[in-house]
Amino acid sequence: MAAMTPRILPLLLGWLLAGPALVFGQAAAAPAAPAAAPARPTRPIPAVEHVFIISIDGLRPDKLLQADAPAMRAMLKAGAYTMWARTTAMAITLPSHTSMVTGVAPGKHGIYWNEDLPLSKPVWPDRPTVMELATRAGYSTAMVAGKSKFATLNKPGTIGQVWVPAGTNSKDDNDTVVAHTVTIIEESKPALMFIHFPETDTVGHDKGWGSPEYLAMVEKSDRQLATILAAMERAGIRQSSVIIVSADHGGQGKGHGPEDERSRNIPWLITGPGVRAGYDLTSQADLNIRTEDTAATAMWLLGLNLPGDLDGKLVNAAFVAGTPAPARGARRGAAAAGPAAPADAN
Ligand SMILES: [Zn+2]
């Protein structure tokens, strides 16, 4: 982690000024856990010890299918998937990612903007992220994101290890994100990690979502995903990890935004213990996956309480029969005795 210090330092200073100190490194496995923190929750699928949420910014499903993308294609065989998931109505980066990790629509989390704001005080989402809930429950957590505005998701004390680019309205490339991600995986094996690849969106805005350059960046992103999966293998956690790959929005022309299906349509891929293999989630006509379902599913996998007003739902259909359905506002263990939820639970 020493190599990150120069980039992390300005952010760290900002956090120190803004609130409780945030500790980096392996010692930060359970930062700011209250003294009365409950015991580690009971997970519905005990074999799942790690959850990774990987967002490829601006990844449009049809371009993914067009691309030479062996890592994501392997996820289609090994796991459950849909190319018809939907992001927020706003279909822009920061509100959509906030919905992805809080499980609520922008109207509840309150992050409507898409840039670093020059405010005298930082503004955090009005709802906890899955990282925060996991940290509170005693799990080790991490986030690596390629745009500085993701600092909005890093309320002090809520995520164990964080890397985002320093500066204001700045971004970095996928390689930098992958390097920091690999370091954290190999050194800390976090129980929950949120990873953001920025560059597909960068190329989309620059060259267009239908451009050859965009397609090439999708393919490069797939190879970079493979690098992260290889790090999980080396760390010995690949087989105990659920991996969700999705996106915050698609795009058309050189932009993205509301009122356009090409922006709202996102892929949703999941693999790991207990996940159905080769299962197309559109097999269930009533099942419409939304980006908020990512947070709900991750919360469930970690045995966390699902907040009562969550908009997202567990994507129960992605898991083999026999996995228990969650109870909202109740401890996970209390619902574990029930039978598997029917497919229409989503
Ligand atoms: Zn975006």
Image: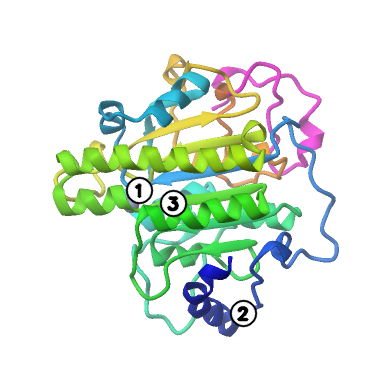
Which mark lies nearer to you, 3 or 2? Answer: 3
Looking at the rendered structure, the secondary structure element under dot 2 is: loop
Along the line of sight, which residue is nearer the eye, 254 or 257? Answer: 254
Which mark lies nearer to you, 2 or 1? Answer: 1
Give residue 226's quadrant in the image: top left
Q: Earlier in the sequence, mark 2 or mark 1?
A: 2
Q: Which mark is residue 196?
A: 3
Looking at the rendered structure, the secondary structure element under dot 3 is: strand
- At 35% across and 53% down in the image, what residue appears? 198
Up-down relation of residue 321 to residue 178 (above or below): above
Say if mark 3 contacts mark 1, CB within 8 Å. Answer: yes
Q: Which mark is residue 37?
A: none
User: Which residue is identified by label 1?
Assistant: 57
- At 35% across and 42% down in the image, what residue appears? 221
Q: Position of residue 103 (x, y in %)?
A: 53, 46
- Residue type indicated by callout 2: Gly
- Residue type indicated by callout 1: Asp
Magenta residues, start to end: 319-346
Give residue 71's quadrant in the image: top left
Marks 3 and 1 sit apart, C-alpha to C-alpha, by: 7 Å
User: Which residue is identified by label 2?
Assistant: 19
Q: Is residue 333 magenta?
A: yes
Magenta span dominant secondary structure? loop
- Residue type indicated by callout 3: His
Q: Position of residue 211 (x, y in %)?
A: 15, 41
Could you tell me if residue 102 is visible in this image?
no
Looking at the rendered structure, the secondary structure element under dot 1 is: loop
